[in-house]
Image (cartoon, rainbow, N blue to C red):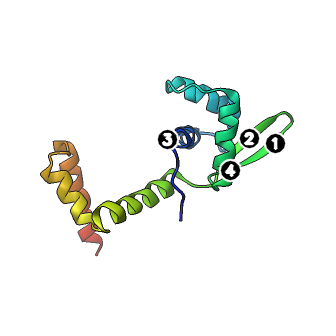
Amino acid sequence: MVQQLSDAELEIMKIVWGNPQEVTLFSYIMDGLVARGRPCQKNTLIVLLSRLMNKGFLSARKIGRRNEYTSLVSETEYQTAQTKYFLDKIYEGSANGLISNLILSDLLADEEYEELKRLLEKGKEKQ
């Protein structure tokens, strides 16, 4: 089971996942946090990166005086695990309950509703 991330940890992982390079440098993460309007102190980032490594989200390799971080969990894997957790916790595992709520509560834009219909039809064709 993929562990849940704190908001700060998730911000860091979004930066790592968004990096087109295979490895992410500490300075890239620091700059990414600033660009997202979430600057933090160097020591705070070190602690958060350590937590992410302990949770199995990142690995680190020391190259001279710098660390290179590699993601061990993809963004899709995390999203899937969190969606399943949310469905189980809030909707007792019912995707139908979630979709019904989105539609009946007017939480979907017209384009999103149409895209959802297309996805459902595509899924039917595969069966």
Contact check, label 2 and label 1, Cβ < 8 Å? yes
Q: CA distance from mark 1 to mark 3?
A: 26 Å
Q: How many marks?
A: 4
The residue tagged 2 is: 68
Q: Position of residue 10 (x, y in %)?
A: 52, 43
The C terminus - image quarter: bottom left
Disc 2 element: strand
Which label lies toward us, 4 or 1?
4
Residue type (three-letter) at the residue carrying disc 2? Glu
The picture quadrant where one finds residue 116 is: bottom left
Q: Nearer the viewer, residue 22 or 49?
A: 49
Classify 10 Å Cα crowding around label 1: few (below 14), some (14-19), many (20 and above).
Answer: few
The residue tagged 3 is: 7
The residue tagged 1 is: 62
Residue type (three-letter) at the residue carrying disc 1? Lys
106 vs 85: above or below: above
Q: CA distance from mark 2 to mark 3?
A: 22 Å
The residue tagged 4 is: 53
45 vs 75: above or below: above
Residue type (three-letter) at the residue carrying disc 4? Met
Residue found at x 50% / y 50%: 75
Q: CA distance from mark 2 to mark 1?
A: 6 Å
